[in-house]
Image (cartoon, helix red, strand yellow):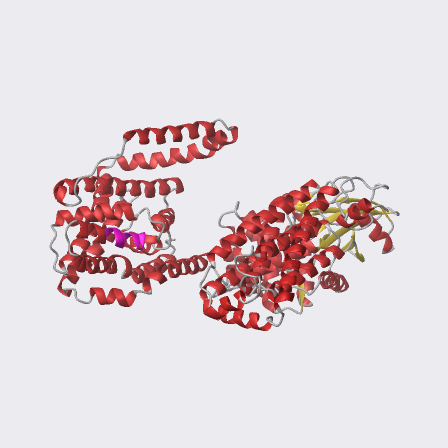
Amino acid sequence: MSTSDEVRESIDLHDGSLSDGSDRTGSGASEEITRRYVRSPQDVLRLITFALVSLTFIGITIWLEDAVIGVEEDIIELFGFLTPSIERVLHGSIEVVSALVLLGIYLVPLFVKRYRLFGYIALASISSSILMRAVRWLVDRETSTSVLNELAERAGITESVPSSTIALAQVAATFIVVGPFVTRRWRRAGAVTIAVLFLLRLLVSVRLPAEAFLAIPIGALCGAAVLLALGRPDRRPTLGAIQAALGEAGLSVSEVHAASVDARGSTPYFATLDDGTGLFVKVLGSQERAADLLFRVYRFLRFKNVGDDRPFSSLRRTIEHEALISLLARDVGVRTPRLRGIVDVGADSMLLAYEMIDGSSLDGVPDEQVTDELMRSIWLQIGDLRAHRVAHRDLRRANVFVGDDQVPWLIDFGFSEVAVPETILDADVAQMLASLAVVVGAERAVGAAIDALGPEAVGAALPRLQSKALSGATQESLKGHKGLLEELHQQIIERCGVADVQFVALERASRNTIITIVALALATYFLFPQLADLPGIIDQVREANWGWTPVIVLASVSTYVAASMSLAGSVPPRLRAGPLFMASVGSSFASKLAPAGLGGMALNVRFLQKQGVDQAVAVSGVGLNTIGGFVGHVSLIGVFLIWAGRDAFGSFSLPDPKWFVIGLGIVVLLIALSMAIPATRRLVFDKLLPIIARAFDGVTDVVRRPGKVLLLIGGSALVTLSYLTTLYFSTLAFGGGLPFATVGAVFLVGSAVAQAAPTPGGLGAMEAALISGLVAAGLDSTIAVPSVFLYRLFTFWAPILPGWLSFQWLERHDYL
């Protein structure tokens, strides 16, 4: 065999057809002729894992700097036993080995003409280098003197030497992207290479050791991202491999082809034995196992009390578990297909082969053929499972097969469990009730269940008869049958004599809980640096004349009343005053979680939708409210600048209008170019214009009503006037000295400038703009600084708790 052939074999890329038309290796292309590239759940899992590890290391390095430096000192001391000469040799060796490894990884794909793999490697290497440099800049920190001295003392090795931690990240990234293309032996060699380079990097600490720990997960993250974005070779067993594997299990197969059926958690195939018997083959491999793990993690984070067990330790245990339950169910009298064989196929896949049933799954049977007798037969088999404490846990119409003789079979025990508590068995009943009710209605579905299982078993399933407990397919079917779940509830209550229904709490973290947690996390992230200076703020405002407190509080509260007025005037329907005020207070809390008030705008849109306002009208109403506030703010700026006169800021000039014309021309050109693209035109005419039309109708209804226009304009203006009045009273609390018009001009200009800051509520920028404006207007800095902090205390900090409580109230009362 030539060297080129050996390299090609190690790369293991069978892009062309095989000599005999089949692939009996068990791994290779998804079909025999052409290799496909797929986005695999394995890469999703790896991406999440490496991202979490990278973020954890970065967070520890930034927020526990002193502790990390201490660990680094210990590591340097631990690995500091080498002499300077040996260290110089090792350092040079690391650089040479890293360069050779990277060069080899680049050259081999070019040598064997695998240009797609070369692109993967180049992209992974470049992205890991950029990300590693960005992370090094992010975690840049002062290091202890002992660490710097220890590094400097190593003869000939200084921090000015190009850091091999970037090369380490590149090596990790390239080995990740190469992994799916090579054999297991080469993957192991890659892991050993990375481990050796990492240990050598610790022995010769050119950079601080923490960077070496960061380099590997960051490089692996980039490699996983490249594979997920561009796809990896589909290494699922080929048809030839499946046929060969079945033959080794004593099942001589004449033909195998892919099956277009619902087989969640596996890849399905149909096969035909030499004697004409049909087989249904389920193949599970590393991709299905990764998808199952992601699914279980999601359910663990989202739900509780749903009966999920821990994932099995290996693919073999998963396959054996399904086979055990299938055999048990058949043994206790449940009609389920006969299991004919379990066999390995390829390096990381296994299959189960079942005898074929002539017929169709229940979701493919015409509705009129779903008779009461058929449903009763289904329920009797479910009763047999219940009697032996076997939970199917995926009972939906796709997993009920109806033979040509109209006899039902239960299939697919991949999610099943044995020896389960009664509540999990009740979940099976709830699943099947909802699935059948979509076809035959609530009354017939409940009647058939009671006839077979009895009213007690059906009534016990009621607490689990809720949308969150049902399969995705059943939930999707229920969307076209509004109110069907409520009908099922009522039927069970009436016919099973259920007196008090206590639905099982299934959500571990509801959507509202997640939103609240994220909101609090963002609030902590943005607000904690400001709260760190809370003692200083208290010292600054301690000398205020607190007799002004009532009017300051009143002016601050009036901003929420005014905001309620403007929001009420922005949409046609009439809104209740109480919830509307609570929404305004709650939006003040939400606005502190994102720049430019985006959080508050999102809350207002959701609130209006819950009040029955069309989504497009709600969005346009919030936009109209924002525009009204902007127009009112700009108008007041003109009024107050004229009122205050030149003494406020001195003279100023407008920018050259030619730049406005140039910018407008660029915008028009970009719009024209985008409209030249057919896909953009379709999006605009089919999606965007109908939404704009509905929004325009809502705006037109508002404009035609003088009362609504008055609320909108008056409320918007009153919001701004209330804020500047609060600032004016805050200056008076420290002695004042500036006229109301001057303070108003300073506030209007300063707050407009602060809105450009990328922080919630203009944190930092607002204080700086107002203080500098008041000082420029003639107020002494010893008065301006505490006045602004007093103003922010009552308009930004104090409303946080009431805003959060209002947010919670709106959630509890279903206004969000």
* Residue occupying image coordinates x 74% and y 46%: 359
Magenta span includes 765: yes
**In the visual, does 448 lie left or right of 726?**
right
User: In the image shown, does 102 or 441 lie closer to the viewer?
Assistant: 102
* Residue occupying image coordinates x 63% and y 48%: 227
**In the visual, does 94 lie left or right of 459?**
right
Magenta span includes 747: no
User: In the image shown, does 718 or 370 lie closer to the viewer?
Assistant: 718
Rendering coords of residue 699 (x, y %): 31, 36
Looking at the rendering, the stretch of residues picked out in magenta corresponds to 762-770
Residue 462 visible somewhere in the drawing: no
Rendering coords of residue 205 (x, y %): 57, 64
Disc count in the image? 0
User: In the image shown, does 286 or 304 lie closer to the viewer?
Assistant: 286
Q: Quadrant of residue 367?
A: top right
Q: Quadrant of residue 162?
A: bottom right
Residue 597 visible somewhere in the drawing: yes
User: In the image shown, does 434 or 314 lie closer to the viewer?
Assistant: 314
Our reading of the magenta stretch's main secondary structure is helix
Rendering coords of residue 38 (x, y %): 66, 45
- As drawn, 244 above or below 386: above
Rendering coords of residue 93 (x, y %): 66, 59
**In the visual, does 116 lie left or right of 646?**
right
Q: Quadrant of residue 343?
A: bottom right
